[in-house]
Image (tube, rainbow, N blue to C red):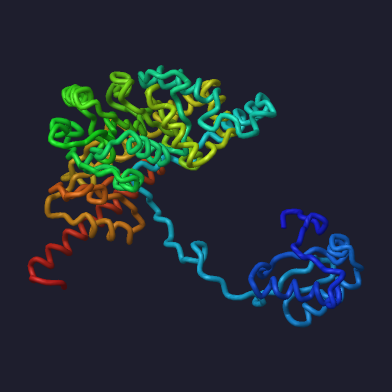
Amino acid sequence: MFGLTSSELDTLIVVQRDSSTSLGRQLEDQLRDAVRRGALAAGSVLPSTRDLARQLGISRPLVGNAYSQLAAEGFVVLRQGALPRIAAGSTPARAPTLADTAQAPAPQFDFLPSVPDLGSFPRNAWMRAYRKALEQMADEDFGYRNPHGVPALRQALAEYLGRVRGVIAHPDQIVITSGFAQARVLVGRMLRALGASCVAVENPGYTNLEPITSVGLRISPIPVDADGLQTELLGDTDADALMVTPAHHFPTGAVLSGARRTLLLQWLRSRDAIVLEDDYDSEFRYDRSPVGALQGLEPDRVLYAGTSSKTLAPALRLGWLVVPPRFIELIRQQQSQSDLGCSRLDQQTLAELIRSGDFDRHVRRMRSQYRARRDALLEALRTHIPEAHVTGIAAGVHVALELRRTDDEAAIQRAALSRGVAVGALQEHLVGECLKLAPTLLVGYGRHSEAAIRAGVRALATSIHATRSRNSNTNKTGGSI
């Protein structure tokens, strides 16, 4: 019980002194009923006789007699020197919960895309920033103030994003969100309120588009190739808005070319459209100069979204939207309808982490580690799967592994998982109509050391070759063997 004492235990029991039922019987009945209903679960601790008597204003012997009767009936366990507990098997069977569901064992090699190294969260730096934030916060900061983001974080982000991403933003244009998930919801509602009817999206791309479609907006998928979104096709749609990952397309890793950026901006201005730019992992660049944010080229029409999920950890649930001034009040209204904002403590801590320089130091450290892991992955792929074509290697924490046209993505995934390797597949990210794409695996390298990456690739290669061999034998015999 983590040091809990009997005097700290409250129990929902009320006795009626004017009732015809004795006080002791009332106590027995209420405890027995709570156990039968499942309100008091097996193993739950009850107050001592002294404490419960004090809480109810009745005599201690009355409580002792009630506990003894319930113990005799098998509802309560009494032991010398220990607090009473609800007996095992005395409570009704519960409906299965997620915690009761058998969980598949975690794969030995988690190569799923876009998962950062969760073990590298800067705990010490975060705790320093947390203590500093607590020292600096006024009493009023612990209330409901600043539901759209604390000033310290909005100021820190405005400076940081301008410095590293070329984003043009005043602190008042920044709204702090619960990750990109909430940002999509807010922008979808905003678009609908503005009268928009259709949103263009990348294909392949994000498949969880319910935040957009649930408000009545239609989706228009636009194909992506090695140069990013095929922006020349935007004019063939009736889209009023676009969701795009121009700096590092998810999931292929393509970078929107300069020519296509120009076409996108031309479409944006001629259509008077709106863009939601997801800059989800822009900090991690290895073999090329950073690509500036699209927002810096058209700040009046682009809503820029970023998060701490890749740089720090998804568990923080901290993201941000840089909103053109003409839309800021509408976005704030949409957020006010959803919640009262993200944790002010975490926001103040992140602001201090950025101000102190610890955030930049953490990003530089992780960029170096991820590059070493990326290099180990590429070397292992060249050794064990040399026929595969690897793309998306210049940035992020995953690569796309294009296989032979005859390969079966799903079969390879299953075979790999049976050997303890989890990988993603490009087909899982198709939107709307199915494109004829080469079988492609998505291999993340953020979570494992170089040695583990090499071992995992060997297991993946074995899975690929075994699947090919099985398919070859099936084709030769004309059926399953």
The N terminus: image quadrant: bottom right
Q: Residue furthest bottom?
A: 73
- At horizontal 86% and vertical 76% (from top left) the residue drawn is 22
Question: Looking at the image, is 212 positioned above or below residue 289?
Answer: below
The residue nearer to you, when weighing 209 against 460, is 209
Question: Looking at the image, is 300 positioned above or below residue 385?
Answer: above
- At horizontal 27% and vertical 30% (from top left) the residue drawn is 246
* Residue 120 appears in the picture as rendered: no
- At horizontal 20% and vertical 27% (from top left) the residue drawn is 271
Across and down, in percent, residue 41 comes to: 66, 68
Image side of residue 203 versus residue 371, left or right: left
State how many labels appear.
Answer: 0
* Residue 171 appears in the picture as rendered: yes
Question: Looking at the image, is 22 positioned above or below residue 188?
Answer: below
Across and down, in percent, residue 207 comes to: 29, 47
Name the quadrant containing residue 117: top left
The residue nearer to you, when weighing 110 against 149, is 149
Question: Looking at the image, is 260 positioned above or below residue 79?
Answer: above
Across and down, in percent, residue 116 comes to: 41, 40
The C terminus: image quadrant: bottom left
Image side of residue 118 versus residue 435, left or right: right
Across and down, in percent, residue 446 comes to: 38, 40
- At horizontal 50% and vertical 20% (from top left) the residue drawn is 155
Name the quadrant containing residue 235: top left
The residue nearer to you, when weighing 423 against 151, is 151
